[in-house]
Image (tube, rainbow, N blue to C red):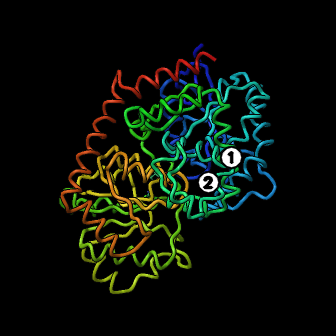
Amino acid sequence: MNTTTTTGKLTNGHRLVLLPLPFQGHLNPMLQLANILHSKGFSITILHTRFNSPNPTNYPHFTFLPIPDTAGEPNPLISDVGMVIRFLHYINISFVDPIRGCLERLMSEDDGVACLITDAQWFGIQSVADELKLPRIVHRTSNISSFLFFAAYSRLTDTGCFGSFSDEETKSKSLAKGLEPLNHQDLSKFLTSDPESACKVIELMVEGTKRARAVIWNTFKELEEGELEALSQDFPNPHFLIGPFHKYFPASSSSLLAQDQTSISWLDKHPPKSVLYVSFGSIVKLEKSEFLEIAWGLANSKQPFLWVVRPGSIGGSEWLEPLPDEFLERIVEGRGYIVKWAPQQDVLAHRATGGFWTHNGWNSTLESICEGVPMICSPAFGDQLPNARYVSDVWKIGVELQNGFEREEIESAIKRVMVNAEGLEFRNKITNLKWKVNRCLEKGGSSYSSLEDLVSYILSF
Ligand code: UDP
């Protein structure tokens, strides 16, 4: 059955309801997915929280439905992992009834609802979908490798093993199967931030993903072939690897902050592959001392840099106040540029960008792979830790800083990636992945075919 939407576009009569998590790194891929599915003829309703809500005027072809206010909505200014965990617990309890109400209403309308697609972190909604007999597909905004890590981690907590990771004896043992290639240092970093609540959220997310009808991944088969095989053993639901999403539609329209376009005119003045781009995403916060180490590491490396410093991301400061005048006058004026938020995908695609110092959020990591830009990794929490380990130890397309933020190590890592022969090896490897990305999106390629399969799968409901 074909019907016409309010924008006049013909649809196949199947309405999809998408429920994103209200964080930048989750909104971007969910709205890209919405655009991808809309281009395949589905009509799209975005069910969203009132805070960090996407801007409907950028998507006139979608219907937006805010979830009715719940008592005491949390402050969306999340700035550390503990807050993220508390927030996830909160929304998966307090928002369940209002979401059920919205879904019931939508299902009773003439269009009905063919299927609900939620972020994996909306694990509390699986029971609602079961009750309403509504197929729920999970969209996991990160990759398979990190999901396998989460799954193994939640199994470890079941057996009580992980509580003893601080013992010297345990540290000398190799990690349990499924946690490789992470090491004990990664795990202890993972565990320091409110381990019990983090554990519970991970368990619920893994369990909710298992119970979903299917899973959509923003990754591509050629990158994670072995991991997909391992995943399918424990998670027999269908998996659709249709990424990288941003290659179909860019993220700029879902940006919550204004992207400073002068970044691009500044890059235009630089020779090919000469600039290091530095950004730690939308959530990571730094101490003032770390901020200063980064600044002096950049200064001592003598490489040009474009640095995103999000206002409020440095403890106790509004923006650049901790930087000494000497740094701003001598170093930044000479060969640096600092912005509050950049058009990241355009920056990574710019010919002048030669390296990316990142926190390894999955979007940033994937965007870097797609443009063939080698990385320096400074993961802070969650999936950033396994992502960084894969970049440095498995895909070998970058280096990870081992000692947090320390100016000598920073200077040396920048030189390894931007100047030394080792950097060329990283670039060759990541360029190879970039070609694989291009191929997987072409007709007959793995992501192209998986998307066709996903469309047929949804139409079969
Ligand atoms: N981003 C951006 N401008 C910036 C920094 C980041 O547009 O200055 C975008 C980036 O392209 C990515 C998203 O914000 O799509 C960050 O997502 P990611 O998963 O990398 O990290 P998170 O913010 O969730 O920690």
Residue 40: x %, y % from top left: 49, 24
- What is the x, y in percent for residue 258? 47, 59
- Residue located at (34% from left, 51% from top): 346
Of residues 221 and 41, the one drawn nearer to the viewer in this rendering: 221
Nearer to us in this view, 91 or 358: 358
* 109 relative position to 212: left or right: right
Q: Where is residue 36 in the image (x, y as percent from the top left)?
A: 48, 32
| Residue pointed to by mark 1 | 159
| Residue type, label 2 | Asn
Residue bearing mark 2: 52
In the rendered structure, the answer to whether residue 201 lies left or right of residue 54 reads right
Q: 73 left or right of 374?
A: right
Count how many numbered circles sit on residues in the image. Answer: 2
Compared to residue 175, the image places residue 269 above or below, namely below
Residue ID at (46%, 82%)? 322
234 with respect to 418 (left or right): right
